[in-house]
Image (cartoon, grey):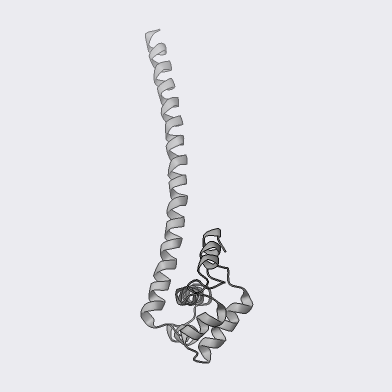
């Protein structure tokens, strides 16, 4: 948990759950999905996990995107596993795609930077070649 979340939970424990912002363990994720399967209400799940409702939904969205991209799970099955509706799952998939595209763009910016450096070196060599040719033509 970040220091910010820790401070918020200490100052106002009634408003901020103890596990807010902490990483999810595999066991906790299994417990979350079992609660969804059992039809538990999201408020009860959040209380049990000591997390916010938003944190529960965010984790379910992460799971939904993982099921879509890594396991090629059907939309209907993702809905059954996560309890999310089609719109929420599509938003989770879109958000994951945006993250991947952003990482690709950062990589391409580095590649463009390398290309610009190479072009600068080529330009320098061409300038040297033109100067050499001028000296040769004068003779």
Q: Which of the 4 image quarters holds residue 138?
A: top left
In front here: 87 or 52? 52
Front position in the image: 13 or 93: 13
Q: Residue furthest right?
A: 27
How many dots with numbers?
0
**Residue at (38, 75) in percent of width and height:** 90
Residue at coordinates 48% horizontally, 75% vertically from top-left? 52
User: Is 115 placed above or below 44 here?
Assistant: above
Quadrant where the N terminus is found in the figure: bottom right
Residue farthest top in this picture: 139
Res 112 → quadrant: top left
Give the residue at the far front of this rendering.
Answer: 11
Relative to 125, residue 60 above or below: below
Q: Could you say which quadrant of the image residue 23 lies in? A: bottom right
Residue 78 location in percent, x, y? 47, 83
Measuring from the top left, give residue 8's x and y in whole percent.
Answer: 51, 64
Identified at 55% across, 61% down, the residue is: 2
Between 37 and 44, the one lying in front of the other is 44
- Assign the C terminus to one quadrant of the image: top left
On screen, 79 above or below 131?
below
Residue at position x 56%, y 79% from top? 49
């Amino acid at each position: 948990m970040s220091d910010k979340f820790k401070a918020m939970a200490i100052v106002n424990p009634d408003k901020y759950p103890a596990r807010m912002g902490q990483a999810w363990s595999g066991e906790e994720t299994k417990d979350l999905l079992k609660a969804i399967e059992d039809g538990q209400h999201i408020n009860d799940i959040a209380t049990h996990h000591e997390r916010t409702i938003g944190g529960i939904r965010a984790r379910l969205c992460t799971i939904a995107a993982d099921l879509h991209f890594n396991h090629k799970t059907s939309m209907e099955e993702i809905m059954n596993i996560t309890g999310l509706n089609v719109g929420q799952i599509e938003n989770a998939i879109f958000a994951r795609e945006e993250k991947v595209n952003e990482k690709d763009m950062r990589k391409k910016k580095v590649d463009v930077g390398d290309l610009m450096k190479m072009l600068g070196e080529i330009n320098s060599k061409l300038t040297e070649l033109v100067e050499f040719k001028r000296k040769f033509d004068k003779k």
